[in-house]
Amino acid sequence: MPTRLYRLYQGLTLIALCLFLAGKVISGKLTWYINLRFLPLTLLGIVLLAIMAQVVFRKPRSTDAHDHDHDHNHAQTPPGNLAILLIPVIIGVLFPARPLDSTAIDSKGVNVSAPLIGENAATRELEVTADQRNILDWIRIFNYEEDLSPYLGQTAKVTGFIYRTDDLPEGQFLVSRFVISCCAADGFAIGIPVQWDGADALEENAWVQVEGPVDAAELDGLKVPLILADKVESIREPEQPYLFP
């Protein structure tokens, strides 16, 4: 491949990657793939890709003169190798991103009590009021606090999607969210049981806001929070459907 054409191919590949990542950042969908803490690194990558593309396009044309009548190349990366860089872009265009939902739980399962990772895991939930705690905060309380009595009876107000398991009693469902530690590939679902008179009429995977006092219950032999719902309202899926430890 002539050097001039090869450099054009290089530059367009870099620009495609740059625009693809920038589009995910602008749309807010980047965190559907990776943890929010990697956003600065992604922004740095976008800048570097743009700089590399400029370098490729602004390389002095005089260096191409000897390629006019020659098809040989000097230490060129095979064009097929460059095409590999376009695979993420092609996949992203052909298969639009969407958050993990209850269909992913069917293969990964749902977590209601196991210890969860993250810095300051045992302290964040103490820094916010009861109605500001999310599903992850409540589960952490039941993991790390030996004395749960100060928390029982407090009013929870959490959002998540509906999921049901066979071991839940009648009139209960799980209000669930996915937790992303690094990227969507390692995402796992967590859930809190909710007692609600109209539970059986709620559509699975629908997003709801649940409000009511917290009690303690046992599920699979483990002590877990149970929300005795006073109110269950249907809501739109939030712009950020994931929780980050």
Image (cartoon, rainbow, N blue to C red):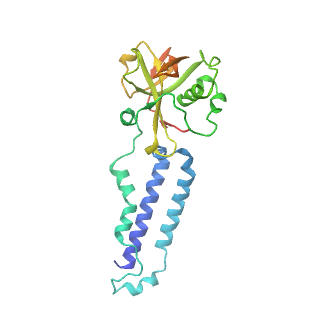
Q: Quadrant of the C terminus?
A: top right
Give the vertical position of 225 relative to 24 (above or below).
above
In depth, the one of 215 and 48 nearer the eye is: 215
Q: Quadrant of the N terminus?
A: bottom left
Q: Residue at x 50, y 71 (%)?
A: 55
Q: Where, by quadrant of the figure, is residue 140 drawn?
A: top right
Q: Residue at x 43, y 55 (%)?
A: 20
Q: Where, by quadrant of the figure, is residue 76 drawn?
A: bottom left
Give the vertical position of 225 relative to 52 (above or below).
above
Provide residue 44's location: percent of width, then percent of height. Answer: 56, 57
In depth, the one of 103 and 64 nearer the eye is: 103
Provide residue 221's location: percent of width, then percent of height. Answer: 48, 21
Q: Residue furthest top?
A: 197
Provide residue 14's location: percent of width, then percent of height. Answer: 44, 64
Picture mark count: 0
Give the side of residue 106 with respect to residue 29, left or right. Answer: left
Provide residue 207's location: percent of width, then percent of height. Answer: 43, 28
Give the side of residue 105 with respect to residue 31, left or right. Answer: left
